[in-house]
Amino acid sequence: QTQQHCLQQLFCGSDNIIIPSKTNNASHHTTYTLSKTTTTKMAARSSLPSGAGTFQPLRHRSGTLRDRLHGYTKQTLGAGGSLNDAVSLPQGESCAGWVAVHAIDFYNDVSTIWAVMAEDPYLDSFRPGEGFPSGVEYRWSEGSGRDATTVSVSAPVYIEKVLQWIADQINDETKFPDDDDEAEALRVFQTPQFAALCGQIFRRLFRVYGIIYSSFFGTLEALQMAPHLNTCFKHFMFFCTEFGLLPEREMEPLEVLVKPIRKQYHLSKGK
């Protein structure tokens, strides 16, 4: 419990994001600002959606800590286990490592869903600055110092940039090690820097889900992918609730979806 509490404080840290406060002022405006980080591109990097069906999920190399931890979830869900069992930290395992593996798996889930939308002409109808919820503007920052530039982007472009940013972090093995040295991997996963990075990843994935539900649910429903979307989001929210990874204010825009899922989670825990 102590380890999980410490991680929660780091994962829910500041991300230069301000969720809109409730107001009657029509001119109220909020900005989501993200920074693009230059990282080392590894040979086994993931392929972001560039067309329907082209996304190649990130894998965990066989025999590594990441692969072993991933196996717990795969085995639990494959055997018909509950989501509650699937998100619970396996006995004797590192909480930080467990969160790291799920950051990758949830990135794969979202990217696979987004790949279905990547070539939809509807994406071109979004204008820069229009966001979800109402009053939110999406901006993307590139560079640093005097060379830094910030541009207003549309919701689909925001998603693409967020997914690319996450892929860059995961494909940098100094940040997400995937080798045979479990001790070294755990050393990286248990640092405050890694906890803060994972916190950013989970918050940004949540925002991507928000955009998908608010703007693309009808399309995914027509493609008969709504059940898959709902299952992925429920798994994501069960995990985030289990480890306290999302600040309350971050979840407010999707409260109508989040509230019943969290209620189901707490009921399954007998709380």
Image (cartoon, rainbow, N blue to C red):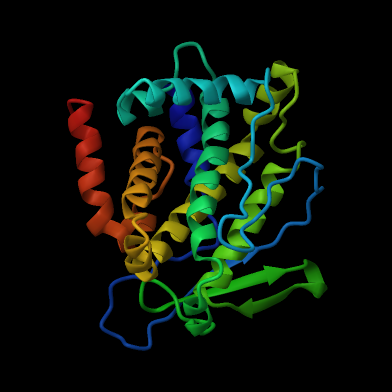
Q: Of residues 39 and 41, which is closer to you in this image?
A: 41
Q: How many marks?
A: 0
- Residue 263 image position (x, y, % from top left): 20, 41
Q: Quadrant of residue 133?
A: bottom left
Q: Residue furthest top?
A: 92
* Left or right relative to 58: residue 249: left
- Residue 244 image position (x, y, % from top left): 39, 38
* Left or right relative to 227: residue 271: left
Q: Where 203 sits versus 243, above or below?
A: below
**Picture quarter with the C terminus:** top left
Q: Residue at x 58, y 38 (%)?
A: 195
Q: Residue at x 28, y 72 (%)?
A: 22
Q: Of residues 116 and 83, which is closer to you in this image?
A: 116
Q: Residue at x 67, y 76 (%)?
A: 150
Q: Where 210 sits versus 134, above or below?
A: above
Q: Residue at x 64, y 35 (%)?
A: 59
- Residue 266 image position (x, y, % from top left): 22, 34
Q: Where 34 sits versus 195, above or below?
A: below
* Left or right relative to 253: residue 164: right
* Residue 168 seen in the figure: yes
**Picture quarter with the N terminus:** top left
Q: Of residues 130 and 49, which is closer to you in this image?
A: 49
- Residue 229 image position (x, y, % from top left): 37, 51
* Residue 199 seen in the figure: no
Q: Where 261 sits versus 186, above or below?
A: below
Q: Quadrant of residue 143?
A: bottom right
Q: Of residues 236 and 21, which is closer to you in this image?
A: 236
